[in-house]
Amino acid sequence: MNKKDVIIIGGGPAGMAAAVELYNQGIHDILILEREKMLGGILRQCIHDGFGLTRFGTTLSGPEYIDRFIQIIKEKGIAYKTNASVIELKADKRVTAATPEGLLEYQAKAVILAMGCRERTRGAVTDAFFQTNQEGIFAAGNVLHVHDLVDFVSLEAEAMADGVARYLKEGSLPECTISVNAGDGVNHTVPQKVLPGRDVTLSLRVSRRFRDVNLVIRQEGAVIKKKKLRRAIPAEMLTVSLKASEFTGKGDLEVQIEC
Amino acid sequence: MKDLYDVIVIGGGVVGSAIARELTRYQLKIGVLEKNEDVCYETSGRNSGVIHGGFAYDPGTLKAKLCVEGNRGFDALTEELDIPFIRCGKVLVGNTQEDMENLKRTMKQGEINGAQNLVLIDEKELHELVPTVVGKFAMFSKNSGVVDPFIYTIALAENAVQNGAEYFLGHEVTAIERKDNVYEITAGEKVFRTRFVVNSAGLGCGVTSDMLGIKGYRVIGSKGDYIILDQRTGKDLSMPVYPVPSNTYMGIHVTNTTDGNVIVGPNAVTVSDFTYYGVPQENMDYLAESASDLWPCIHKPDYIRNYSGILPKWVDENGVIQDFKIEMREDIAPNAINLVGIESPGLTSAVPIGKMVVSMIAEKETLIPNENFNPRRKGIARFEKMSNEQRAQMIQETPDYGEVICRCQKVTKAEILQAIHNPLGVHTMVGIKYRTRAMMGRCQGGYCQMRIEQLLEQECGLKPEDIRYNRADAWILTGKVREEGN
């Protein structure tokens, strides 16, 4: 049984951004398992441009955007296997993959789910560290919730990599005790659990079209954040940042749209 | 002198293929004419997949007799032909006094028919068998089961071919003439000359019977729609659950499949167009609503596909559904075995029907056994069903077992390749689907369809524009959007 610090399931935008960030934080014992013949994930088929506007300040086609990451992966010698389909993942972080070279088994300290979504996002419950409800198993990117902009996928994966790095260093992560509840007009939020004392960025989608409304976050009945939205539609993901100093209570956060 | 066949079987569905296979036990030159590009595109591949116990038919009918016989032999058959089958039993669930009377009548009818292992059970026993069902009591038919109808039909056909039968796919029969004691059957661009002919055309049985000169059968279509639920629902249904039936209609039921899906349906609508298989939304809503009384586990997020099937029912002038008709009308069409109205329980009865047809031919002439007949057929070994040890071993021997093509159903490249190189020469996308289960999962081919299509091109030397989804005119790709260099 091969041991690895981190196994990343999926070599697309989320998986690769996470790998690069982990590497930059000194974690080198990583392995990306990708089922296709090449790295890149869904971006390989997004031949229109518009990718990278936020991240790189220029507009690239999908393959061009992802190639920037592939180059870094190769330069840094981050390990990856293509033609490797993960067929089993156990709660204790044992990973089994089918490859033409054989059935491979790994024992990971942390596992990152970055498989993207084919048909429907199943939407794992994640906390502020992007850890799922399974200890040591993290998720980011389209597997968690469908993104409009791959630039945000990269950011999300990097934020998750922070959590993974801390998990590996400390052996565990503090429990995120504050739930984030999606109220009126809000479809879902990521993450669904946050940690008191730690800044967090919430990603969310509204459940229908709105014009001239407020995104309101309350804790224990008191408004802690109000963001004016001139226009909000389900098709565009929104983000709202909360500083730790903005939610100092013990109660859950309620996020909703108010007129 | 053109080839003279001993027997031509019109229709390569489950019954036609069972007949062909039984015929290959003898030294006969057999041809099967199938109008579609594969053997299970019509009724044989569009049903509930249930192997019936035999209690639902009027005593003394062929339906009753052949169903009981077919049910009895089914374990041996599936072992011989490597067909997925689960003898899980089935419950007919009731709540009222009237239901109880019906069930008691059904049990009595079953006993007369020779159906075995029918027992009345109470609410407690019912919930031990199927915890999720809603009902006060039930009749439990222990001998009932579920089969993969695609593999079943394909296996019969492959074994028939293995044993020397010739299949002509894409050959619809358009004319039958009799000249000099021989039938001349026009199908596709060819004329087949044969001494015996079997009409096993299913939905086409009425039209084919007319072509033989045996006119007057009124055949209606009974169309039933189904919803297919995702495999995550399979754990909630251990066996088919039916409401209390009548002798003409089984009722909206829910059925588990051999792969852990659940199918909801069918309803029953009389149709005269035997080519339309669309499923209207309101029918799906009706199915879900009706079946939910019995099994309240039907939720839209679990719907992955729908389909429909049409049963050919022979009816009299009053519209009353008749028994199977399996006849030889020597006065009108000598040496022709005419099968009309082979609807449910056709799947269960297929092999006994085959044996009956053979015995009818044997009455007309002495049949010489085929010493080389081999009843056994091996299917494609499925990666999904293997243990990790078996998988590791398989990949060592055949590296293509390590490349997963259909992620939803864990179907590997090795299986797709074996399916492409199948004994019947079927090269449609759906042909691969039925043989491997690729494209039957949650994403319905969203991921693997393109890869399967590329493998078909590669293995069969086809251009993308040649590939068909299922029917002869079901083109998938029409041409390049841009030529290279543009």
Image (cartoon, coloured by chain):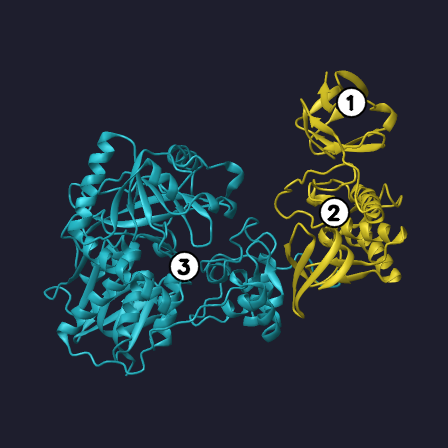
User: Three-letter amino acid code at disc 2?
Assistant: Gly
Q: Nearer the viewer, mark 1 or mark 2?
A: 2
In the image: residue A255, left or right of residue B264:
right
Tag 3, which secondary structure?
helix
Q: Nearer the viewer, residue A42 or B316?
A: A42
Q: Residues within 10 Å of mark 1 (few under 14, many from 20)?
A: few
Q: Nearer the viewer, mark 3 or mark 1?
A: 3
Residue carrying label 1: A230
Q: Which chain is yellow?
A: A
Find the distance from the CA under tag 1 to the CA under tag 2.
39 Å
Tag 2, which secondary structure?
loop
| Viewer can see residue B39 | no
* Marker count (numbered): 3
User: Three-letter amino acid code at disc 3?
Assistant: Phe
* Quarter that holds the N terminus of chain B: bottom left
Q: Residue furthest left?
A: B331
Which label sits on residue B150? 3
Q: Is residue B121 above or below residue A246?
A: below
Find the distance from the CA under tag 3 to the CA under tag 1.
56 Å
User: Three-letter amino acid code at disc 1?
Assistant: Arg
**Please, which chain is the residue tagged with disc 2 on?**
A
Q: Nearer the viewer, residue B72 or B270?
A: B72
In primary-sequence order, the first of circles 1 and 2 is 2
Q: Residues within 10 Å of mark 2 (few under 14, many from 20)?
A: many
Image point (46%, 37%), residue name = B298
Q: Which chain is cyan?
A: B
Residue carrying label 2: A136
Find the distance from the CA under tag 2 to the CA under tag 3.
43 Å
